[in-house]
Amino acid sequence: MTATLLTRRAVLRLTPLEPGEDVRSFLQGLVTHDVTGALPVWAALLSPQGKVLFDFLVWADGADLLVDCAADQAEALAKRLGLYRLRRKLGIAIDPALGVHWQPGAGPAPDPRLPELGQRWLGAASGDSADAAWLAHRLEQGVCEGPDELADLLWLECNAAELNGVSFTKGCYVGQENTARMNWRQKVNRRLVVVPLAASDPARQRAAYPALGLAVDHRRVENIAPQQAPAWMRSALAEG
C-alpha cells in the first residue's frame, strides 16, 4: 500500500451547535480567503498587522468546516479561533478520526495552491507516513508552509497571491488592511524562496533541511536569482 498519511497535519472541525449558526460566515470574517464558495482553499489567520499566525487549508463537510493545519499548531489555532467565537454557538475541536492524505501526480483532488503539488484529501487517520516524501516534493515545487517557514511574515511575502491563498474581493478579515495595501501598491519587497542549502543566506534563512540540501530564505526580490525562482513565481518577480 502506498504511504499517503501526513502525520504532521491535524484536522480541526468547526460545527454549528444551534440552528441558524453558520461556520462559514464565522470564518469568513477572520481568514484571508473566501470560504463561502468552492472548497478547499489555502488561507491564513493573520495578526492585525497582517503577519502570519497560522496557515491552513479549509474543507467543507456538510454544515461543518474542516481545517487542515500543522499538528503542532492545532490546539493553539483552536484556542485562537475560540477567542473570536464570543457568544456564538460553535464547536471548535480537533477531530482525531480524520487525517490528511497526499500523493504525487495528477488526479481528481489537486492541491488548491498548485496542481503540481499533487493530490490531497481528508480520510481516516490511519496509514503509513508520507511526511518525508511530501516535504521533498513540496520544496521541489518551491512552496512554503507551516510555522517554521511562514510565521510572523507578511502574507503576500509568503507568495499567497501566486498560490491562491488570498481573495482581494471577499471583504474584511483580520490583517486585511496591510494585505490589501500591499496588493494595491504592487509592492512586495521580499519573498520566501527555496534555495540550495549551500547558497542560503544565513541572515535570511527561515528553515534548513540538510538531508535534502535545501533551505527556505526570506529574501529581497532583487536578491532572488531567476534560476532560484519556480516557474509560478517568475512573472510576479518580473512585475516587481
Image (tube, rainbow, N blue to C red):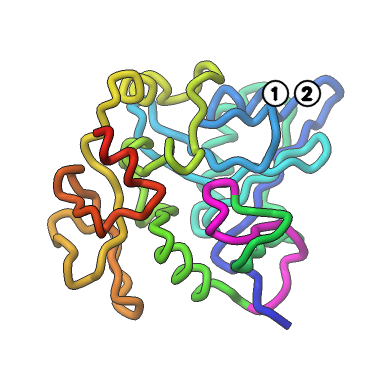
Left or right position of 94 against 123: left
Q: Residue 38, image x and y in percent?
A: 70, 34
Q: Residue 174, image x and y in percent?
A: 46, 25
Disc 2 to disc 1: CB gap under 8 Å: yes
Q: Is residue 205 above or below residue 222?
A: below
Q: Which residues are magenta?
A: 112-128
Left or right position of 25 against 138: right
Q: Is residue 155 above or below residue 120?
A: above
Residue at 34% x, 40% y: name it. Answer: 235
Q: Choose top left, top right, bottom left or bottom right for residue 203.
A: bottom left
In terms of secondary structure, where does tag 1 sit?
A: loop
44 or 190, nearer to the observer: 190
Residue at 82% x, 20% y: name it. Answer: 20
Q: Is residue 113 magenta?
A: yes
Q: Is residue 159 magenta?
A: no
Q: Residue 119, image x and y in percent?
A: 64, 60
The C terminus lies in quadrant = top left
Q: Which residue is mark 1?
A: 88
Q: Residues within 10 Å of mark 1 (few under 14, many from 20)?
A: some
Which label sits on residue 212?
A: none
232 or 2, nearer to the observer: 232
92 or 126, nearer to the observer: 126
Q: Amino acid at mark 2?
A: Glu
Which label sits on residue 21?
A: 2
Q: Choose top left, top right, bottom left or bottom right for residue 100.
A: bottom right
